[in-house]
Amino acid sequence: MPRHLRSLLDLTAAELDRVVSLAALVKRHPDRYRGKLAGKSIAMIFTFFGSERPSFSPNLKAARKEIS
C-alpha cells in the first residue's frame, strides 16, 4: 500500500535518518541510481506564503562577517 509523505513529522527518527543516509549515498554515487525511478511518477508540492522570503539569521550574518 502506498504511503504518502506530507510532512517530515510523518516520519519516525529512524525513517528520517534512513532517508538522509540514502540521499547522501545517492549523491556520492549517482551512477548506481540512474534509472531507478524510470517509469514511476512523483510529485512535489511546495507551499509558499507570499509575505515570507528566505532570509539569513542574524547569527549567520555575524559568522560570515567574522570569516571575511
Image (tube, rainbow, N blue to C red):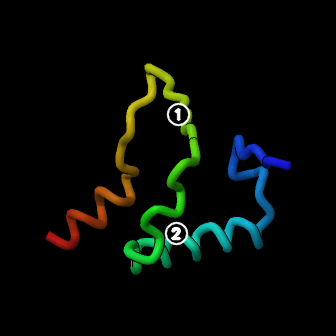
> Is residue 36 left or right of 55 when viewed as pictured?
right
Residues at circles 2 and 1 in contact by the CB criterion of under 8 Å:
no
Up the image or down, 51 lies above or below 37; here it is: above
Question: Which residue is at 72% across, 46% downward?
Answer: 5
Residue drawn at 44 percent across, 21 percent down: 51
Q: Which residue is mark 1?
A: 46
Looking at the image, residue 4 lies above or below residue 47: below
Query: Which mark identifies residue 23?
Result: 2
For image coordinates 67% across by 73% down, the residue present is 18
Pinpoint residue 23: horizontal percent, then vertical percent: 52, 69
**Dot 2 alpha-carbon crowd within 10 angstroms: few under 14, some 14 to 19, many 20 or more:** few
Q: Secondary structure at mark 1?
A: loop
Residue 21, given in percent of the width and then of the height, sits at 58, 76
Using residue 54 as the reference point, say whether residue 67 is left or right of it: left
Residue 56 x %, y %? 35, 49
- Provide residue 68's location: percent of width, then percent of height: 13, 69
Between 19 and 7, the one nearer to me in the picture: 19
Q: Amino acid at mark 1?
A: Phe
- Identity, as a three-letter code, of the amino acid under mark 2: Ala
Residue 41 placement: quadrant: top right
What's the CA distance linking mark 2 and mark 1?
19 Å
What mark, if any, has residue 27 been given in the picture? none
Of 23 and 63, nearer the camera is 23
